[in-house]
Amino acid sequence: MSVTLCFDFGNTRRKMAVFNDGELDRVEVVADDSDSIRSILDKYKPRKSILSSVVDHNPELESLLEDNTRFHKLNHETKLSFSTPVGKPETIGADRLALISGAVHQFPKQHNLVIALGSAVTYNFCNKFHEFLGGGISPGLEMRLKSLNYYTAKLPLVKASSNAPLIGYDTATNILSGVVLGMAYEIDGFIDEYARKFDNFNVLLTGGDIVFLASHLKNRIFADPDLIFKGLYAISEVNNP
C-alpha cells in the first residue's frame, strides 16, 4: 500500500489527509511540533508527502518530511495542471493553487468557480482552457462575527449557526441574519455575475463553514469539504513521480 500525506496549514487550523493508493482514507487535525510529526511518520509510514501552508510553521517539519518521504512544498514554481496568467503568480496563496488543482482534476476542460469558506472567503475562477484568472477575497464568517463584537461597545460575540432567520427577533439572531444571510447573498451575487459572463460553469463550495452557508444558497453548487486535499494529492502525483 502506497501512502501519501497531504498537509494543509491554514489560518484557522492545521490539517492532514491520508491517501492510501490514491483513495482518501481520513482527515485529521494535526500539530506541527517535531514529536507529533515523527509520530505521524511512524504511524503511517508514508511514501510521499506534500505541504500547502499560508502560515509560519515549524521549520523542522519540512526537514522531517524531506528525510522520510518524497516531499514537495507547494509554491509558485510547482508543476500544475493549469496556468496562472496573472500579474504576480508568486503571490497566489498555496491553498488557492490546491483548490484549483482539485477542480481541474475533477472537471477538466470546463469553467470552474471554487468558493472556499475559511478564515477568508476566496473566489477562484479557472476557465475551460485551464487558466486560473484570479477571483476575489472577502472576510470569512468568523471574522465577520468577531468584527461586530470587537468594533462595537455592546454587540456580543455570537456563535456561528445555520439557523439564521430573515427577520431577527433578538440581538443574536439579528447578527446571524446580517452575517450568515449576508454572506449567502454575497456568494449568490458573485455566482450570478459569473453566470452573466460564462456559460456552463461548475460552482464548487468548500471549507469548514459549508455547514452554515450551503443551505441558504439558491444557486446549484457542488459541496466538497475535502477539495483542497484532492488537489494536493493530484499535485503530489505530478511533482513526486
Image (cartoon, grey):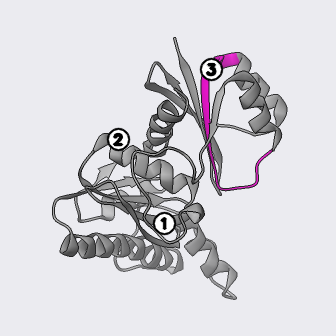
Label 3: few (<14), some (14–19) or many (≥20) C-alpha neighbours in 10 Å: many
The disc placed on residue 141 is none
Looking at the picture, how far across and down is residue 86, in whole percent? 46, 68
Looking at the picture, how far across and down is residue 162, in whole percent? 42, 61
Q: Is residue 161 left or right of residue 15?
A: left
> Is 201 in the magenta?
no
Q: Earlier in the sequence, mark 2 or mark 1?
A: 2
Label 1: few (<14), some (14–19) or many (≥20) C-alpha neighbours in 10 Å: many
How far, Cα to Cα, is label 2 from label 1?
Answer: 22 Å
Q: Is residue 160 left or right of residue 125?
A: right
Q: Earlier in the sequence, mark 1 or mark 3?
A: 3
The amino acid type of the residue labelled 3 equals: Pro
Q: Residue at x 65, y 79 (%)?
A: 149
Q: Residue at x 70, y 88 (%)?
A: 153
Q: Secondary structure at mark 3?
A: loop
Q: Which residue is mark 1?
A: 121
Above or below, comparing residue 108 to residue 122 in the picture: above
**Is the residue under label 1 in contact with that under label 2 (CB below 8 Å)?**
no
Q: Which residue is mark 3?
A: 46
Please, which residue is most extreme toward the left here? 199
> Is 57 in the magenta?
yes
Task: Place residue 219 in its image quadrant.
Answer: bottom left
Magenta stretch, residue numbers: 43-58
Q: Which residue is mark 2?
A: 105
Q: Nearer the viewer, residue 140 or 134?
A: 134
Camera-side mark, 2 or 1: 2
Q: Is residue 110 left or right of residue 77?
A: left
Please, which residue is most extreme toward the top here? 1
The amino acid type of the residue labelled 1 equals: Val
How far, Cα to Cα, is label 2 from label 3?
Answer: 23 Å
